[in-house]
């Protein structure tokens, strides 16, 4: 009977490299924004528009790739090490095919940008940039496949290391291609697109070479020696990946549509929304790290058919994230007037952002609980019900509440943000109840 202290130590050991890696991934976008911003407001607006559209589509691919983590963790927990390699190879087949589907979808989406009522000069930049970064989805999905395989085996440091290196590579390529340094042509926003493409090719190549050759992975057979298409494994991946991707889509899409609502209110409100949301996104990365650690550990115990281990690993992850996010919430509340000044000096925007940061301080805990809750359920390979829960919480309840509070009752942007508390709280509650149901009804 392992102690909760042991579970906390193991969870944090798995989580911190994921957190650092995710922050590194965020830095890729931050660096792009800073460097593109130096060439003008129009390219920056085009970059924001294109990246927002790509994310909504690519999140489906991320969900598909994440399916590998619990399946590999379960196989490892069951001592079926050869099966881990089978899952990797079949996962590569699924994700390569799915990446081409995403690329084709975005290819046709490019022609629809002109109908989004954006300035013509922004549309022109966005269309060209989007066509370039669209191709980068293929190497990104290859990287994701190996990343999720590595994390499923509890090796969370290799992806972290590659993501950190990629930040510097992306910055260097941006410097060369955006501004035309070292004799290269000045490509401006398209240069940022090519830098992203080449960075993702590096990420895919680096993680493939490492996992293929590192001794620690050899017992799990990470080779490309296919014995054929294993339809049973592919079915498992798709059955877990599709609802997982849709669950992510409903969550991200809900927040994206809320941003559109805020844009209806005013420019200052939208700027304040972006500041507060960016701060909340940084703390969310910690929750995401604990969530992935929970997926891995729950999957291992499920493979071992250890219900007590599942229970303790799940409760420990929930306790850790509630404690951490509660601390972040307190920090947000205390520093609510200072944090916006790190982004902007506009007094009106700072005032609005401060009020939104107060609301963010209240939903920190439930945001952490919901992302760890979905991680626990992912480890149990239970994602169909959470997919529907997310749809109801964010779209059926959350967005109508946002419209009611923001526009009908005229609470403005603060009303929209209160709806985040509602949606996240509902998701957290029902994910927890779903976990409780598993514990009550499962016997090994």
Image: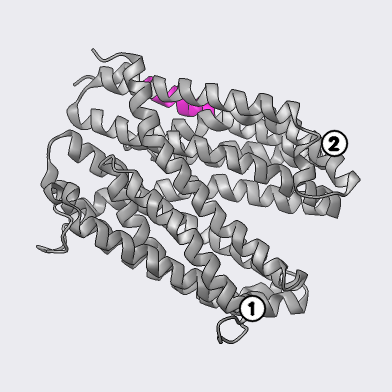
Q: How is the image coloured?
A: one colour
Up-down: is 331 above or below 120? above
SS type, badge 2: loop
Q: Quadrant of the C terminus?
A: top left
Is residue 110 visible in the rendered structure shown here?
no
Q: Residue at x 56, y 54 (%)?
A: 27
Give, as a single range, the part of the protein colored magenta.
Answer: 428-437
Instruction: Indicate the position of residue 23 as horizontal and vertical percent values.
Output: 52, 47
Query: Which residue is most to the front?
Result: 182
Query: Is residue 432 within the magenta segment?
Result: yes
Up-down: is 244 above or below 436? below
SS type, badge 1: helix
Query: Is residue 337 within the magenta segment?
Result: no
Determine the image quadrant of residue 122. bottom right
Determine the image quadrant of residue 284. top right
Instruction: Indicate the position of residue 314 as horizontal and vertical percent values.
Output: 38, 24
Q: Which mark is residue 411?
A: 2
Q: Residue at x 13, y 64 (%)?
A: 226
Left or right, 12 with respect to 124, comes to: left
Left or right, 346 with respect to 117, comes to: right
Left or right, 257 with respect to 29, comes to: right
Is residue 137 visible in the rendered structure shown here?
yes
Neighbor class of circle 1 (other Cα within 10 Å; few <14, some 14-19, many 20+) is: many
Q: Main secondary structure of the magenta part?
A: helix
Q: Which residue is mark 1?
A: 179
Q: CA distance from mark 1 to mark 2?
A: 44 Å
């Amino acid at each position: 009977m392992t102690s909760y202290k042991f579970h906390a130590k193991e969870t944090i050991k798995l989580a911190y490299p994921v957190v650092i890696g995710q922050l590194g991934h965020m830095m890729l976008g931050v660096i792009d924004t800073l460097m593109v911003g130096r060439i003008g407001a129009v390219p920056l607006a085009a970059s924001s528009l294109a990246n927002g559209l790509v994310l909504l589509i690519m999140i489906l691919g991320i969900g598909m790739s994440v399916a590998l983590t619990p399946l590999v963790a379960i196989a490892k927990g069951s001592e079926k090490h050869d099966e881990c390699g089978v899952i990797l190879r079949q996962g590569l087949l699924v994700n390569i095919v799915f990446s081409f589907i995403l690329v084709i979808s975005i290819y046709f989406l490019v022609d629809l940008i002109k109908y989004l009522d954006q300035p013509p000069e922004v549309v022109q930049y966005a269309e060209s940039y989007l066509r370039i970064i669209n191709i980068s989805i293929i190497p990104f999905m290859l990287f994701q496949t190996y990343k999720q395989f590595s994390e499923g085996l509890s090796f969370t440091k290799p992806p972290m290391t590659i993501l950190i290196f990629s930040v510097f590579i992306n910055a260097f390529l941006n410097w060369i291609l955006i501004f035309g340094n070292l004799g290269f042509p000045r490509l401006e926003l398209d240069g940022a697109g090519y830098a992203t493409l080449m960075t993702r090719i590096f990420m895919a190549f680096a993680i493939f070479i490492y996992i293929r050759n590192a001794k620690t992975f050899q017992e799990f057979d990470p080779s490309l020696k296919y014995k054929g298409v294993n339809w049973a494994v592919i079915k498992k991946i798709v059955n877990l990946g599709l609802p997982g991707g849709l669950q992510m889509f409903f969550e991200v899409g809900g927040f994206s549509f809320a941003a559109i609502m805020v844009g209806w209110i005013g420019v200052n409100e939208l700027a304040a929304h972006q500041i507060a949301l960016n701060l909340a996104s940084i703390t969310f990365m910690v929750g995401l790290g604990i969530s992935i650690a929970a997926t891995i550990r729950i999957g291992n115990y499920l493979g071992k058919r250890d219900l007590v281990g599942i229970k303790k690993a799940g409760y420990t992850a929930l306790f850790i994230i509630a404690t951490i996010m509660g601390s972040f919430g307190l920090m947000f509340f205390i520093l609510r007037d200072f944090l916006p000044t790190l982004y902007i000096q506009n007094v009106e925007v700072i005032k609005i952002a401060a009020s939104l940061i107060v609301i963010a301080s209240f939903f920190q805990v439930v945001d952490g609980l919901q992302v760890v809750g979905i991680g626990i359920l992912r480890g149990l390979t239970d994602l169909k019900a959470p997919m529907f829960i997310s749809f109801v919480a964010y779209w059926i309840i959350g967005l109508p509440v946002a419209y009611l509070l923001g526009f009908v009752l005229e609470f403005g942007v603060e009303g929209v943000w209160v709806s985040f508390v509602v949606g996240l709280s509902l998701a957290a509650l029902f994910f927890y109840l779903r976990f409780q149901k598993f514990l009550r009804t499962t016997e090994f």
